[in-house]
Amino acid sequence: LRENPHRHSATHPQCTTIAKHASTAINFLPQPTLHNSTHHAHHPTQPHHHLNMSDSWQSQVDLMWAWTAPFAAAAVNAEELRDGMRVLDVAAGTGSSAIPLAERAKAAGYDGLSVLATDLSPAMLEQLDKNAATAGVAAWVRTAPDDAQCMRAASSESMDLVVCVFALMLLPDPAACAAEMFRLLKPGGRLVTVTWQRAPSAEVLAPVAAELGLPLEPIEAAKRKLYSLATPEAVTALLRSAGFTGVLETEVFTHTIPSSMIADNADRLVANPMVGRCIASEKHTPAQTAEAIRKVVRANPTAYEASAAVIARAVKP
């Protein structure tokens, strides 16, 4: 077994404030209510998913991977790797970013490169370990439970590359996470983030609610949070405020999925802890809600095929 090069950092003052919010990290959506009725380059002019993996999440793993993996690959495959690099994947989930990075390291013969994958959910990381073993890259990947808003699994200025895919916009305090990632990077280290601009599974919610006669405000509130970093300008402002004052580039990456992916997985979407609770209703069974999803998608299939995200790349001065 290769030695794990990552060391635990001492608690720092910010953690005292942030740690109390760790248990609320999954509550970016309204609490369940059962209803009874292009490319930009920025040059400065001056100097979570975190999700507790319940049984319902276990059933979502392959579906989540299918939706997010193309974006994760686009984000990490463009990054240059070298032997000896220390890479951190923040809110790594089940490995859609960490595993491709490790596969590239293995293919290049970079036995000294290591990927530390962290997530608030130990169950997610357990699945990531299994996925890494299946892919034959377990020797390149280490996992550690950690809070993205107050990270203790690595020491300050210890990372060459930090990756955060589809987590920043879900956190109660994205700015705290951005500051933590800045802290953990070495000077000259690179950051890559991915945030949703358009998620088909979210776009289908309002039409389904209308079909079922449910109020739209819980869905609109959830989408405001999900899309809170949906523009290059919003992501740039967040990263600038964290200290990334050097060259910062963003691009909007798009990907098309077959609408059948939503229709065929309607029952699983109803069981999804995020999606399902937005359209929960005492008046409708899960089967009826799933049928409403299928009806909406089949009525206008092309409306739910396009997905898009903002990929940002920054360098720590």
Image (tube, helix red, strand yellow):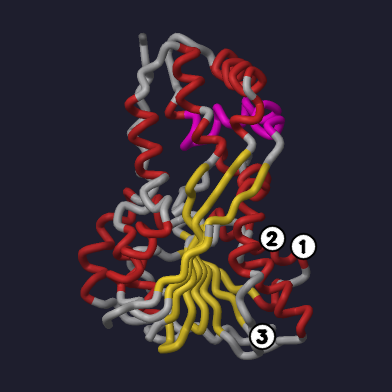
Q: Are marks 2 and 1 in contact (CB under 8 Å)?
A: yes
Residue hosting label 2: 130
Point out the image quarter for the C terminus: bottom left
Magenta range is 259-276
- In the rendered view, tell whether residue 226 sits above or below residue 94: above
The image shows residue 259 at horizontal and vertical percentages of 68, 32
Residue hosting label 3: 2
Q: Are marks 2 and 3 in contact (CB under 8 Å)?
A: no
Q: Identify which amino acid the numbered label 1 is placed on.
A: Thr
The first of marks 1 and 3 along the sequence is 3
Q: Secondary structure at mark 2?
A: helix
User: Residue at point 55% right, 83% down?
Assistant: 86
The image shows residue 50 at horizontal and vertical percentages of 44, 53
- In the rendered view, tell whether residue 316 sits above or below residue 15: below
Distance CA(mark 1)–CA(mark 3): 18 Å
User: Residue at point 45% right, 75% down?
Assistant: 314
Residue hosting label 1: 134
Q: Identify which amino acid the numbered label 2 is placed on.
A: Lys
Q: Is residue 236 visible to us here?
A: yes
